[in-house]
Image (cartoon, grey):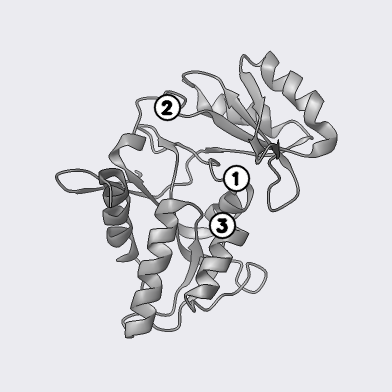
Amino acid sequence: MENTEKLKYDAAIEAVKFIKSDMIIGLGTGSTANYAIKIIAEKIKDGSLTNIKGIPSSKGSEQLAKELNIPLTTIDENPIIDVTLDGADEVDQNLNIIKGGGGALLREKILAQASKKEIIMIDVEKLSDHLGQKWVLPVEVIPFALGSEKLFIESLGASVTLRVKNEKPFITDEGNNILDCNFGVIKKPKDLAAKLNNRAGIVEHGLFINLCHTLVVGTELEIMIIERE
């Protein structure tokens, strides 16, 4: 396991300690979330976690959870989630986050908003003074509005690229496109989020403001746990 993956794995181990028996848990998407899903499955198998039900944030995490025999439910059946474990692409000093590198930002934000506790797991390289220093901002857009929203986001100062996978436009689990928007350093993420929220063609964006309750960071020396005030 290379060093970055080890730091992600270490963070996942620590984050899973917040999971207790009889909980409804949100299952994030991405490499770090996958580590957490596998650790949870091991604990269910050995009996240290019982009566757990998971709500996946993507088709990918759903498939992995099913393969590992984690009992699943839906947000309709359980609209209040005890704890969600998820990764992030970038986190600033105020625990504001950019997510969406894996394309699951819409469902991930729905789970985060429904959670009593949102725990984000990262390796230390994901920390930044300001969002946008290390990662572009994913924006999920309905196909009908793609051209219009691209122009709008460019008018806000971003360089905008349509996300492509296997030489075709990337399609989210909800059937939408993603625009990867390079704003450079985002010093006022709340203001930018408000502008994006007001556009009808934008389904969701990857700015997660005041949604992370606990940040678990894997570092070379120790695990850092940072709680949002």
Along the polypeptide, which appears first: circle 1 or circle 3?
1
Residue that carries the numbered disc 1 in the rendered image: 103
Residue type indicated by callout 2:
Lys
Regarding residue 45, the answer to whether it shows in the image is: yes
Residue 35 in percent (x, y) is at 38, 60
Query: Which element type, helix, strand or loop, lies under badge 3?
Result: helix
Q: Which of the 4 image quadrants contains residue 199?
A: top right
Q: Which of the 4 image quadrants contains residue 134?
A: top left
How many numbered discs? 3
Q: Residue at x 43, y 52 (%)?
A: 31
User: Foreground: 138 or 79?
Assistant: 138
Query: Which element type, helix, strand or loop, lies under badge 2?
Result: loop
Residue 216 vs 45, above or below: the answer is above
Residue 152 in percent (x, y) is at 74, 20
**Rendered-image quadrant of the C terminus:** top left
Residue that carries the numbered disc 3 in the rendered image: 111
User: Foreground: 94 or 99?
Assistant: 99
Residue 37 in percent (x, y) is at 43, 65
Which numbered dot is residue 134?
A: 2
Which numbered dot is residue 85?
A: none
Residue 28 in percent (x, y) is at 50, 57
